[in-house]
Image: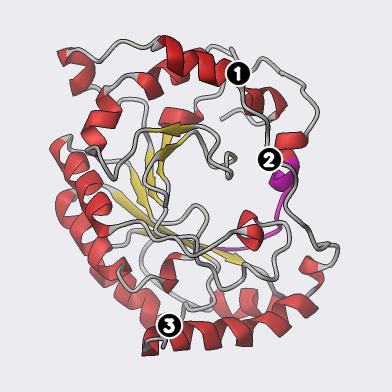
Amino acid sequence: MYSSFERAIRRSARDSIEEVMNDSCTIGNKARTPKKRLSIDREWEAFKKRGAYPELDEKDEKDILIHTTRITLELSNLCNYAQIHKKCPLNIAGEPEILPKEIVFDVLNFLEKHNFSGQIAFHNYCEPLMDPRLFKFVEYARNACPYADIYICTNGYYLNQVLADELVAAGVSSILVSAYSRSEFERLSKIKIDIPFRVWRAQLDDRLDLYEAKVNDIGKPCFAPLNEIIIAREGCISLCCLDWRRVYRFGNLHEQKFEQVMSSGQLQAVYERLSKGDRFLDLCKRCGWSR
């Protein structure tokens, strides 16, 4: 049996489908089936096997977040629009996955220890407003990191003036809304709050095809692995938001503390190579992004 919360979520998700499907921004989204999984990236396997990364020394430990502007905690793989957004990785996601609260609190405690003042987010591939734990996490994050920007990125379906006001009261300091229909854009644009608040007409890209894209190896530097540290719902650190298959995983936060994974030096070693334009990973050779 579903809880009252789960029943409400499922009912709301069904109600939202017809409007978004009829909107012009969804035209052209063709049904997809999962493609063949990317073959093993031999460079990645060799990199891990060599252990070509020194553990951080005391100075490095102190500056461990020096390159980091955002920490993203992917709370789940649940989204009310997943079944109709054919270009979204969640459209072909499997069973529901939830990031345990113990991992969330461990990461936030680490950020408090290091006086983190960057951005803390709760999305990636999920709809954060569906998670009943969100307010607890926001309040904890605000207490742990009083100078951080606590950022909500949402599709806005559940957002209204009352909820927006309560998010601000809980400690949220900026909100970005991806509106997928004209009427939703107009409705959400009427919300007024005293923090940075933006609504935009969103369109999905072709990242589902990135693993099979042509190798172009643009040679441009990419700072993604440390610029935004993504704690994925599976309980690992993800290479970046484009690695939606989680081919490149760092650590196991079910067995390790976040600080242990960050101190291992592995993520930093990948960052050092990519930041110099050495796109040695297969996915990075196919990617045209540089951020």
User: Could you classify mark 2 by the number of other residues whose Cα lies within 10 Å: few (under 14), some (14-19), or many (20 or more)?
Assistant: few
- Please name the residue shown 66% across and 70% down the image: 83
Mark 1 sits on what residue? 42
Q: Determine contact: label 2, label 1, CB under 8 Å.
A: no
Q: Which residue is mark 3?
A: 6
Amino acid marked by disc 2: Arg
Q: Quadrant of residue 109?
A: top left
20 or 3, which is in the foreground? 3
Q: Earlier in the sequence, mark 3 or mark 2?
A: 3
Tell me the SS state at disc 3: helix
Give whichever of 154, 267 is nearer the camera.
Answer: 267
According to the picture, the residue beneath numbered tag 2 turns out to be 37
Mark positioned earlier in the residue sequence (3 or 1): 3
Residue at x-position 63% and y-position 73% = 185
The question of residue 204 being in magenta is answered with yes
Mark 1, other Cα within 10 Å: few <14 / some 14–19 / many ≥20: few
Residue 152 locus on image (x, y percent): 42, 60
What color scheme is it?
secondary structure
Locate residue 285 relative to residue 80 in the image: left or right: right
Callout in the foreground (3, 2):
2
Span colored in magenta: 198-209
Residue at 50% x, 66% y is 78
Q: Position of residue 137 (x, y in %)?
A: 26, 61
